[in-house]
Amino acid sequence: MKTLTLTATLGLLTLTCAPALAQMDHGMDHSTMAMSDEAVEDAVHASAVVNSIGEGMANVTHDPIPEIGWPAMTMDLPLLENAEMMGDISAGDQVTIMLVKGADGMYAIGAMMPN
């Protein structure tokens, strides 16, 4: 019975908290971004360190992203064509990234802001 109660409680917390966490903007001004309102609403934010950044791609080491079930890891992420870089960003910088899920189900960086 305790397991059932714990499972139900965790499920309820996930359902009630996940949308609120996913909509947190982490200080980013989304009003000037050239993407649909739906894409911005569904965006996920994470703290990361930029390892390298180049034409169309960034390698980052990010904290866990519970909204999409990702553990902390280092990975290459594509930059959207219209990705907004808020300030000068270079390797070694600590940033907040905004991940946008594409029609193919894959995530790409829609914006990046220094912390």
Image (spheres, helix red, strand yellow):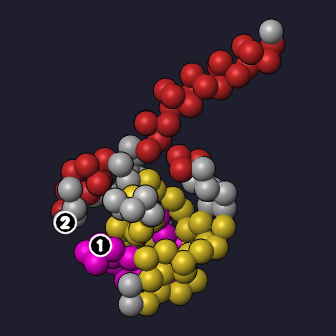
Is 9 displayed left or right of 76 in the figure? right
Q: Which corner quadrant holds the N terminus?
A: top right
Q: Disc number at residue 38?
A: none
Determine contact: label 1, label 2, CB under 8 Å. yes
Is 28 displayed left or right of 99 in the figure? left
Q: Which residues are magenta?
A: 79-96
| Marks 1/2: CA–CA distance | 8 Å
Where does the image place residue 3, in percent across and percent down from the top left?
79, 18
| Mark 2 closeness class: few <14, some 14–19, many ≥20 residues within 10 Å | few
Residue type highlighted by circle 1 = Glu
Where does the image place residue 105, in percent across and percent down from the top left?
43, 58
**Considering the numbered disc 1 on the image, is that residue within a helix, a strand or a loop?**
strand
Q: Which residue is mark 1?
A: 84
Q: Which residue is mark 2?
A: 34
Where does the image place residue 2, in percent across and percent down from the top left?
81, 13
The structure residue drawn at horizontal position 66% and vertical position 57%, both measured from the top left corner, is 71
Dividing the picture into quarters, in which one does residue 83 lie?
bottom left
The structure residue drawn at horizontal position 35% and vertical position 68%, both measured from the top left corner, is 111
Q: Is residue 4 in the magenta section? A: no
Residue type highlighted by circle 2 = Ala
Does the rendering let one see residue 63? yes
